[in-house]
Image: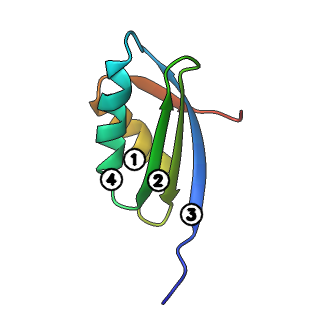
Amino acid sequence: MAATTSTHTLLRAEGFSCPSCVKKIEKQVGKLAGVESVTVHFATARIEVDHDESKTSVDDIVAAIAKAGYTATPSAF
């Protein structure tokens, strides 16, 4: 069995207006293949995603967040 390489991606989000936004984003991103976990921090507008980059790219995650109605960009911190 091959070990999957998990990538930890940190994104900055824009457009959060309420805590229910968190659930919408977690649901959309969680549907993607290879996504192991999604944590949305409402107070800091940060999104942390653990995923298999061979199945889901950062661009795929950004697109899923856009589909939920929000803008996100990869963050260095």
**Residue at image coords 33%, 53%:** 32
Q: Nearer the viewer, mark 1 or mark 3?
A: 3
44 horizontally vs 1: left or right: right
Report which quarter residue 24 is drawn in: top left
Q: Secondary structure at mark 3?
A: strand
Please, what is the three-letter code of the amino acid marked with disc 2? Ser
Q: Is residue 65 visible?
A: yes
Q: Which residue is mark 1?
A: 60
The disc placed on residue 32 is: 4
Question: Which is nearer the N-term, disc 1 or disc 4?
Answer: 4
- Residue corresponding to mark 2: 57
Q: CA distance from mark 1 to mark 2?
A: 5 Å
Residue on which the image places disc 3: 6
3D distance between C-alphas at marks 4 and 3: 14 Å
Considering only vertical position in the picture, is 33 above or below 2? above
> Within 10 angstroms of label 4, few (less than 14), some, or many (20 or more) residues?
some
x then y, percent, for residue 77: 71, 33
Count numbered badges in the picture. 4
Label 4 vs 3, first from the N-terminus: 3
